[in-house]
Image (tube, rainbow, N blue to C red):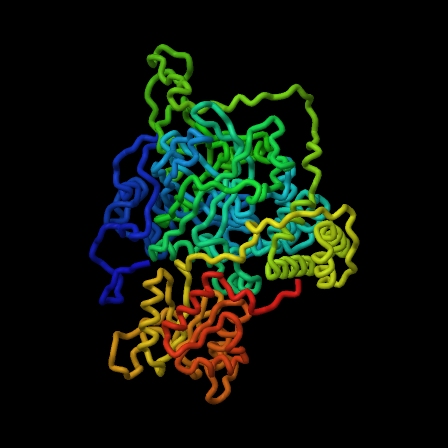
Amino acid sequence: MTTEKSDSTAEPTQPVEPRPPEPDQTGPETVSPTGQVTGAARARVAQSGAYLTTAQGARLHDTDHSLKAGERGPVLIQDHHLREKITHFDHERIPERVVHARGAAAHGVFHGYGTAGEVSKAAFLAKDVETPVFVRFSTVLGSRGSADTVRDTRGFATKFYTEEGTFDLVGNNIPVFFIQDALKFPDVIHAGKPHPDREIPQAQSAHDTFWDFVSLHTEATHHTIWNMSDRGIPRSYRMMEGFGVHTFRLVNEAGDSALVKFHWKPKLGVHSLVWEEAQLIAGTDPDFHRRDLHDAIEAGAHPQWELGIQVFPDTPEQAFDGIDLLDPTKIVPEELAPVQPIGLMTLNANTTNYFAETEQVAFHPGHLVPGIDVTDDPLLAGRLFSYLDTQISRLGGPNFGQIPVNRTHAPVNDMLRDGMHQTAVHTGVAPYRPNSLDGGCPFLAGTDTAAFVEVPVPVPETRKIRAAPASFSDHFTQPRLFWLSMTPPEREHVIAAYTFELNKCQVRTVKERTLEVLANIDPELCAAVAEGVGLPAPAATVPLVAADPSPALSQLGRTWPTDGRVIGIVADPETGLDGVRRVRQKILDTGMTPLVIAPTGGALDGDGDGDGDPVPVQRTYATARSVEFDALLFAGAPPAAADAFGARDAKAGTPAPQAPDPRVLLLLTEAYRHGKPLGGWNGAEGLLAAAAVDSSAPGIALADDATDALDAVEAVLARHRAWDRFPPAA
């Protein structure tokens, strides 16, 4: 964030206009409450004027002292400024979301490829159509104040402001869900939330009530194994897939329909944290994902995702290759139905105000446009009710669509009137149809005028029943497919996640029942977790199915762009800064972010080489932690800094004489065991030796020249980590 410089530390006294948004920030488009473009600058909806005023615009001369009867007298009830200021403060907060309370968001644009025309007539999918979007990422279980890097499902909700109305694609970073029917949604959330007696643990599933539920309700098995995989702890929102979860129905201009599943594919690839990183980050920087998203956009490293669809015939069975498309606990492997790209989304602007935009944005799966319709997925049916009901509760009434971030960019003439927070000023006398007093307006549209018409799907003769189809009853084939599709390192992480979570449970029967579920996925998985929790491994109770692995489910085995990755450069005043300068500039030139780490803040300029500008320092040995970097470069072996003693920085302990700074050794050893690429020059091999790190280990590059070390590190970084540094057992 840029800041204005001042030569004085005193409070400014010369009136100035309110500060404008930063270059990387924007706000909602200035459309009216009824979707009409106003043409007003976005600053027109921000605060204006250089002087403090009341909410009604009256200028104030004092906001530090209540109105009293004398300097020491009682406060007077007539103090309207006190009443207005305190009353508004008392009502600043609105109810946080029951789920997805912790979120971060950004503005962007969606560019249609035109490749969806065969299956959908939606105008925003046409070739070269540019549509504004607003995207909110979130965790599911935690409160607004919880940490970003907890093991949890992430929300991936996109609001398309199309010319035909608003379309909301409200999905997750996991393509399946815990339940098949919305009637069970309160149960799974109640089980995952903190225990009601003590309100702990926060934002995590490692407790008895969660595992009690999912081990009894085995349709949750598929989602649970995804959550126990690396998908549950993404490296960044920018490196996270998104899924529509449900099957949707698309219709083209000819009226032909097809069934589809939506996918968001990140241009940077899908990457994750390792578990120790996630835990450390939750303490050192609980806003890690939020900060990463905003910093990337501010730096111009705009995140991008391709929107793709898997397309299936719209048959009466609504199934594909034996997979029931209405079951939200099932996927269709991409090898059976490839994902076809239909557009590109770029997030290019941060929000201006968190509350006005990120907190008040209201998504709803029922916000559809012509060409996109829902199916009879029983979980989706409940969401169509629940989201609308939730917005009315959170945002104070039925007019939440008039909040600026929620305003459609299409004209609105809905005949809906009044209600709390009505900000439109309607005209006319006949908000009903039919009418003659308003000339018959508003009129109904036909299919030739872009009307939204539900696809007339035949409904077979049947009877009311509370039941699920037989095809919903297979709860183990796809979890086994997922397990078999993981590479050995990923399997180790799944084993470790189940072991960690179950060891946090207190009730033995919950652990035993979960092991019975794991036995029905894979005996190796079950045996390894059973050993970790100290219980016998049970036998499977259902036949283990044969399943061909789906490589698309694995995050490993490919290379990806390194744009926006954060590289730490460890230096000190005695280091020759020529290499630091050159490698720092090359990191910038390649679209990554360099952060120089030194003994103190300020700048490094004491190398005595007489060449080059001072090198700015972004982190110190005391403030840096390995988890905020994707890779580390070491410009030598820096000695202990002046603050390297335990009374000032517990990480330092008691450094040995002539040894490298212990905080730098901690950076090195943590990054090493997290599989991160490491590089060095100018005697950095001494640092590795002091840390007892094998300099010939995979992902370590020592070179005579700083830029050569960077090149080797970047090659490893394209695979995200040095995965072969620690051979797996699984």
467 and 103: which is toward the camera = 467
Residue 565: % across, % down: 42, 61
| Residue 458 screen position, x and y as percent | 58, 21
Vertical arrangement, residue 426 with respect to residue 237, above or below: above
Residue that protrudes farthest toward the top in the picture = 436
Q: In this view, does 458 lie to the left or right of 362?
A: right
Q: Quadrant of residue 30?
A: top left
The N terminus lies in quadrant: bottom left
Residue nearer the viewer, 257 or 45: 257
Q: As drawn, which residue projects farthest toward the left?
A: 14
Spot occupied by residue 636 in the image (x, y as percentages of width and height):
41, 80
Residue 140 visible here: yes
Residue 697: x, y in percent? 53, 74
Is the C terminus in the top left, top right, bottom left or bottom right quadrant? bottom right
> Which residue lies at the image location 26% right of the left edge and 45% below the top edge?
48
- Asked if 156 appears above or below 509 in the picture, the reply is above
